[in-house]
Image (cartoon, coloured by chain):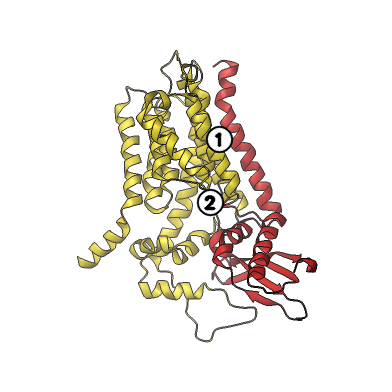
Chain colours: A yellow, B red
């Protein structure tokens, strides 16, 4: 399957090994899908890390794109959005590795994919969702979602009893029912500020990323593109529990860094590792406990 | 960039656009949750898994009243799919799983009625109200009981 014919003989050097390796590493760190595809994905990703010929064979990435697509179909509609992006990304790698100007092709693919992901996210937030821009989404999420509870306590100024009371308040009542002396909704100033910052910061940041990746840029504007994506990932994945999404975006962003841009490459790889740490260390919980002791 | 190279570079993006547009259509017309389906509507709305739920009612022969059932552990996957995308296919799959379980316990079933609900929050006060998204009934062939 992985013959010489499947290995790119490039006029540019093709995508960097580090890009391929980070993609494979992401697949290994977040095993996915039903038993029919999971072991095969893990085996191919593992082999690609161990064997350079497998890593740089377009067949490897076609196979992974196909397997991830199978997972999406079998699990429909349960898969998260970054699994779709992973399938597109593996396809982009496969298409680039099979050609003479792989790096150039992958530059365009990654730029388009990142730009479109953020464009769609903005379209949903601004035009399609009825409860994002008025702050309802983050207000409800920080109160009800256990994964964001520590952040609500730490940055939103809520106490644990206020958070419990708010959860009770948000519990829907049967038609016509009313609770006498039920809990009131408590939203301290800090909570309101946090919600406003995340709501507007999120959508403005995503719109800027979409614009800078979809427009043809040159010179210092390119640095702005990278700075925005790196900042987004460093901030968002500290809170959002989807490290796999962050790793994909960072790996795709890394594609357009030249070998001479060592600082930028270092920033991408460091942020990739930072997202890994976010996902493995309950940093907000640790910080909350530390502040309590201080 | 040559035409062929441009084509290769654009193929993944074209697939993304096609899937995302399909997802918007399904979310608008068939109650697919914006969080799912490849349209990148996650973290944009409360209309996700956490605020949708399914109610299962069983009608038994010679019983005039419906009986509400809990979702059994073996049905959680089918229920999650029906919650996120309450299409006929997903609801039928869940209803059949319920029938299968009832028969395993030798309980007679003449129909299964499923309701998919969504919790919504008002703008200022965040008052929660439930709204039905879909109601689905599966009539069970009595000859198979």
Element type at mark 2: loop
- Left or right of A137: which side holds A76? right
- Left or right of B145: which side holds A179? left
Work out whether B72 lies above or below A251: below
- Cβ–Cβ below 8 Å for labels 1 and 2? no
**Residue shown at the point (58%, 59%) measured from the top left:** B80
Residue A225 visible here? no
Element type at mark 1: helix
Residue mark closest to the camera, 1 vs 2: 1
- Tags 1 and 2 on a common chain: no
Residue A94 is labelled as none
Work out whether A118 lies above or below B103: above
Of A56 and B23, nearer the camera is A56
**Residue shown at the point (47%, 66%) measured from the top left:** A144
Residue A146 visible here? yes
- Residue wearing tag 1: A66
Measuring from the top left, give residue A177's x and y in whole percent.
61, 82
- Residue wearing tag 2: B42
Measuring from the top left, give residue A186's x and y in whole percent.
44, 73
Q: Chain of mark 1?
A: A
Work out whether B70 lies above or below A225: below
**Residue shown at the point (37%, 48%) measured from the top left:** A235
- Left or right of A53: which side holds A175? right
Label 1 crowding class (10 Å Cα cut-off): few <14, some 14-19, many 20+?
some
Measuring from the top left, give residue B54's x and y in whole percent.
62, 66
- In the rendered image, the residue lying farthest to the top is A11
Q: Give the distance between the C-alpha atoms of the residues marked 1 and 2, in whole angstroms.
A: 24 Å
Measuring from the top left, give residue B2's x and y in whole percent.
57, 15
Q: Chain of mark 2?
A: B
């Amino acid at each position: 399957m992985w013959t010489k014919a499947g290995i790119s003989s490039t006029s540019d050097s093709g995508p960097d090994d580090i890009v391929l390796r980070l993609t494979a590493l992401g697949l290994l760190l977040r095993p996915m899908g039903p038993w029919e595809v999971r072991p095969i994905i893990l085996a191919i990703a593992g082999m690609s890390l161990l064997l350079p010929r497998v890593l740089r064979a377009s067949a490897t990435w076609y196979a992974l794109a196909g397997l991830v697509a199978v997972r999406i179909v079998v699990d429909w509609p349960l898969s998260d959005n970054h699994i779709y992006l992973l399938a597109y990304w593996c396809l982009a790698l496969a298409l680039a590795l099979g050609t003479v100007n792989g790096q150039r092709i992958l530059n365009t693919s990654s730029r388009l994919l990142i730009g479109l992901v953020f464009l769609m996210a903005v379209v949903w937030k601004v035009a399609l969702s009825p409860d994002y821009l008025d702050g309802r989404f983050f207000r409800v999420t920080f109160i009800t979602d256990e994964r964001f509870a520590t952040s609500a306590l730490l940055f939103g100024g809520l106490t644990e009893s206020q958070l419990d009371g708010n959860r009770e308040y948000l519990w829907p009542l049967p038609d016509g029912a009313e609770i006498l002396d039920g809990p009131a909704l408590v939203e301290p100033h800090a909570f309101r500020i946090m919600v406003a910052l995340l709501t507007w910061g999120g959508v403005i940041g995503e719109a800027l990323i979409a614009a800078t990746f979809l427009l043809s840029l040159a010179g210092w504007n390119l640095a702005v593109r990278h700075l925005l994506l790196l900042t987004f990932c460093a901030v968002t994945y500290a809170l959002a529990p989807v490290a796999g999404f962050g790793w994909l975006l960072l790996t795709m962003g890394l594609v357009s860094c030249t070998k001479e841009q060592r600082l930028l490459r270092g920033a991408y790889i460091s942020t990739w590792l930072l997202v890994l740490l976010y996902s493995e260390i309950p940093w907000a919980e640790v910080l909350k406990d530390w502040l309590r002791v201080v | 960039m040559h035409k062929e190279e441009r084509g290769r570079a654009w193929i993944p993006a074209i697939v993304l656009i096609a899937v995302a547009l399909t997802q918007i259509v399904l979310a608008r017309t068939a109650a697919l949750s914006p969080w799912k389906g490849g349209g990148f509507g996650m973290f944009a709305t409360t209309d996700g898994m956490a605020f949708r739920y399914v109610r299962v009612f069983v009608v038994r022969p010679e019983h005039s009243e419906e009986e509400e059932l809990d979702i059994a552990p073996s049905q959680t996957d089918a229920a999650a799919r029906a919650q996120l995308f309450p299409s006929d296919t997903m609801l039928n799959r869940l209803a059949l799983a319920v029938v299968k379980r009832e028969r395993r316990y030798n309980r007679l079933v003449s129909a299964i009625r499923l309701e998919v609900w969504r919790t919504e929050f008002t703008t200022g006060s965040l008052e929660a109200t439930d709204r039905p998204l879909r109601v689905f009934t599966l009539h069970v062939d009595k000859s198979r009981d």
